[in-house]
Amino acid sequence: MHISVELTFSPLQDDFEEHIINFIKKLRASGLTILENPLSTQVFGDYETVMTLLHTEIKTAFEMMDKGLMYIKIVKSDRSEYEPHF
């Protein structure tokens, strides 16, 4: 089963940028399809692979900071090639 996940990572501290950059670099190194924009990062792939990666990397990111938020949306399908039809 393939999924699409949208993540918005918001460290609630002054040195937030370093935490976001480190998190995204680890996602990029995974070999999964990753799309980024100024507001979120999207991860696409097999359910088990994506969720295992996120479990590990979210835990690591949270352990490296004092306070933070992670917004997650999950869609049951691979939407990596979505293009608007309008």
Image (cartoon, rainbow, N blue to C red):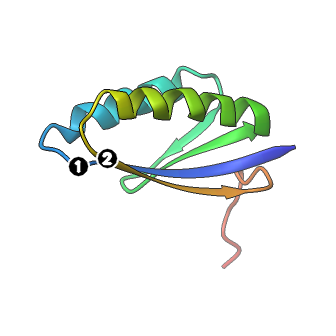
Location of the C terminus by quadrant is bottom right
Q: Amino acid at mark 2?
A: Gly
Q: Residue at x 64, y 22 (%)?
A: 31
Q: CA distance from mark 1 to mark 2?
A: 5 Å
24 to the left or right of 14: right
Q: Residue at x 32, y 32 (%)?
A: 21
12 to the left or right of 82: left
Location of the N terminus by quadrant is top right
Q: Tell me the residue that label 2 is attached to.
A: 68
Does 16 sit above or below residue 52? below
SS for callout 1: loop
SS for callout 2: strand
Instruction: Determine crowd level at label 2: few under 14, some 14-19, many 20+ residues with C-alpha closer than 10 A.
Output: some
Q: Nearer the viewer, residue 86 or 56?
A: 56
Residue 63 at x, y percent in the picture: 35, 28
Q: Residue at x 68, y 42 (%)?
A: 44
Q: Tell me the residue that label 1 is attached to.
A: 12
Residue 79 at x, y percent in the picture: 72, 54
Badge count: 2
Q: Which mark is residue 74?
A: none
Q: Residue furthest right?
A: 1
Q: Nearer the viewer, residue 13 or 83?
A: 13
Image quadrant in which you'd find residue 18 = top left
Residue 11 at x, y percent in the picture: 28, 45
Mark toward the start of the polypeptide (1 vs 2):
1
Q: Residue at x 77, y 49 (%)?
A: 78
84 to the left or right of 56: right
Q: Are marks 1 and 2 in contact (CB under 8 Å)?
A: yes
Q: Amino acid at mark 1?
A: Leu
